[in-house]
Amino acid sequence: MLDRRVFLIASMGTAGWLMMGGLGLPRSVQAASPIALPPLPYAENALEPVITAETIGFHYGKHHKGYVDKLNNLIAETEYAGSSLEEIISGSAGRPEKMEIFNNAAQIWNHTFYWNSMKPKGGGEPPAALKQRMEASYGSVEACKQELAAAATAQFGSGWAWLVLDGDTLKVVKTGNADLPLTNGMKPLLTIDVWEHAYYLDYQNRRADYVKAVLDNLVNWDFAAQNLG
């Protein structure tokens, strides 16, 4: 099996894009040591009523922060001390003995990407370049949204639904637990978190309602379009 640690080297465009801040992520997510909890790109109540401040408070303040605290404890006095988040992910991916480090590092990255994949008063019409890609791959923006919704609702257990570039092709994929498309050489454009803590306080077991509400009202197409470059 191909060692997944090579993904950042093999995908130099992705690596450069990610390391140089092409995701539009806060610089603190790329900090060397210690790994910092990036600030939210909006207030905790900014996504209401779709996602409540209570959910954001627990999700960001407990879960996301918990991954940061755990990772810093795990990498202290190891070969990863002083490494960037992306270096930790690339160095631990595909190594069973480093799975706990990978899981926490990847979850920090995934959550930061997720916060930026949404914005207050999101949804609507994607920018022209992204819209053209969506229409070329799926026939229409609505069809692409339906594929994202299907992937998010079909993911068994915890995980993520992603809009990605695989080479020059726009695709919808899903990953389980902490896995992320970068480890398979794909460039993420946006993501939807379908771990239960992302929606259970607001939607209980109605994951499909949560996913639809995000896609209709919060999805940040501008962020996705920026990541095309």
Image (cartoon, rainbow, N blue to C red):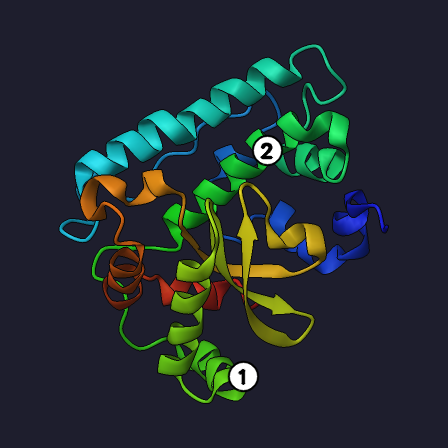
Q: Is residue 170 visible?
A: yes
Quadrant of residue 188 in the image? bottom right
Q: Is residue 43 visible?
A: no
113 with respect to 62 (left or right): right
Kindly identify the residue that appears in the image at 56 percent across and 65 percent down: 164
Q: Which residue is mark 2?
A: 103
Q: Position of residue 221 (x, y in %)?
A: 38, 67
Q: Which residue is mark 1?
A: 137
Q: Position of residue 69 (x, y in %)?
A: 48, 19
Q: Around disc 2, counting alpha carbons within 10 Å, would you say few (fewer than 14), some (14 to 19), or many (20 or more)?
A: some
Q: Which amino acid type is marked by label 2? A: Asn
The answer to whether residue 146 is above or below residue 137 is above
Q: Secondary structure at mark 1?
A: helix
Kindly identify the residue that appears in the image at 74 percent across and 49 percent down: 8
Kindly identify the residue that appears in the image at 51 percent across and 81 percent down: 133
Q: Which mark is residue 13?
A: none
Q: Position of residue 95 (x, y in %)?
A: 77, 34
Kindly identify the residue that appears in the image at 78 percent across and 46 percent down: 4
